[in-house]
Image (cartoon, grey):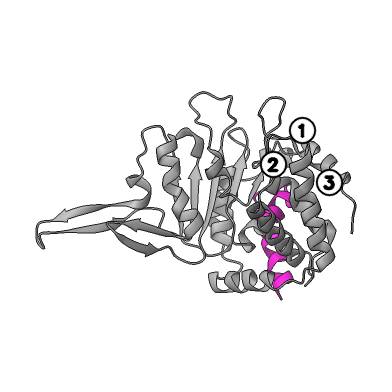
Amino acid sequence: MPHSHVARLVATAGEVILGKERELRLALSCLIARGHLLIEDVPGTGKTTLAHALARLLGLQFQRIQFTSDLLPADIVGVSVFERETSAFRFRPGPVFAQLILADEVNRATPKTQSALLEAMEERQITADGQTLPLPEPFFVIATQNPSYQIGTFPLPESQLDRFLLRIRLGYPGRNAERDLLKGRDRRELLTDMRPVISPAELLELQQTARQAIVADRLIDYVQALLVATRQSAEFVTGLSPRAGMGLLAAARAWALIEGRDHVLPEDVQNVFPHTASHRLRLSSDGRAPAEDDLVRLVQGVELP
């Protein structure tokens, strides 16, 4: 049953996000692993459409936050308002109190505003006026990011990047997919016609099933070998942290579930590794994030169990 759910999700989302099945599977892996997703690409490649499609197909309460240079933390988490009738302050929740948050163009906001998402993403709660308020379950953040060379962007700090389980790029569509886009209906119209494929409760069941996927001791050895390879390589400023290793395993479990298995194989780790590691590593040569090809070469240099 879990595999059929995921197959229907990928197939239905693929009717709107054309020619991007692998990216859709990665996005679903991130969600099933209870992680947050960072999509980095130039405007107009379908980043926002992907977030809308997932929210509709999963029946999740959706909020979009457009990040700009004048956005304040209170615009995200909420604000306390004085009520004359009661002579007391009452907290009005912000848009972060939803099941799926689209943080659109997150690197156009200042670092202070970016950090307002930190507690929500890590702890799944918000602290306001000395009270801790839980966020709804499931809770998932999809952030889109413009390339750093574009005007008006603020680089995300390492502490913020580390909160994202996976980073993907959608890229330009293939020739046939782009032709179908040009000839077909507007994507916003297609989104309006979408109906949920599974319920939030079924999504929570998928997440629980993924956590129970079997991971052999030798596969743990393999994951550790990959972590050590990043730390010992002179190509990177620093290596991957233990938290990154835990995230890698969680994403690999979710990928195995999508493949219809109850156990994790090395191929599952290899499929998600570049997208787990790319935003957490920096090249020693110029400080940029490594390309996917750089990480594929690193994986090829680590012996399989």
Measured as percent of width and height from the top left, residue 74 is found at 32, 46
Identify the mark at residue 266; answer none if there is no mark: none
Identify the mark at residue 299; answer none if there is no mark: 3
Principal secondary structure, stretch drawn in magenta: helix
Label 2 secondary element = loop
Query: Is residue 11 at all visible to an observer of this figure?
Result: no
Residue occupying image coordinates x 45% and y 55%:
120
Identify the mark at residue 278; answer none if there is no mark: 2
Query: Is 120 or 138 nearer to us in this picture?
Result: 120
Judge the density around disc 3: few (<14), some (14-19), many (≥20) Cα neighbours within 10 Å: some
Residue occupying image coordinates x 43% and y 63%:
135
**Amino acid type at mark 3:** Val
Measured as percent of width and height from the top left, residue 32 is found at 64, 63
Query: Is 86 or 9 nearer to us in this picture?
Result: 86
Query: Is residue 302 at all visible to an observer of this figure?
Result: yes
Measured as percent of width and height from the top left, residue 140 is found at 53, 57
Question: In 3D space, how far apart are the residues under numbered discs 2 and 1 (Cα atoms)?
Answer: 13 Å
- Tell me which numbered mark, 1 or 3, is placed earlier along the sequence: 1
- Residue 259 lies left or right of residue 79; in this view the side is right
Identify the image quadrant of the C terminus. bottom right
The magenta stretch is 1-27
> In the displayed image of the protein, which residue is found farthest to the front?
232
The residue labelled by disc 1 is 235
Q: Is residue 25 magenta?
A: yes
Judge the density around disc 1: few (<14), some (14-19), many (≥20) Cα neighbours within 10 Å: some
Question: In 3D space, how far apart are the residues under numbered discs 2 and 3 (Cα atoms)?
Answer: 13 Å
**Amino acid type at mark 2:** Ser
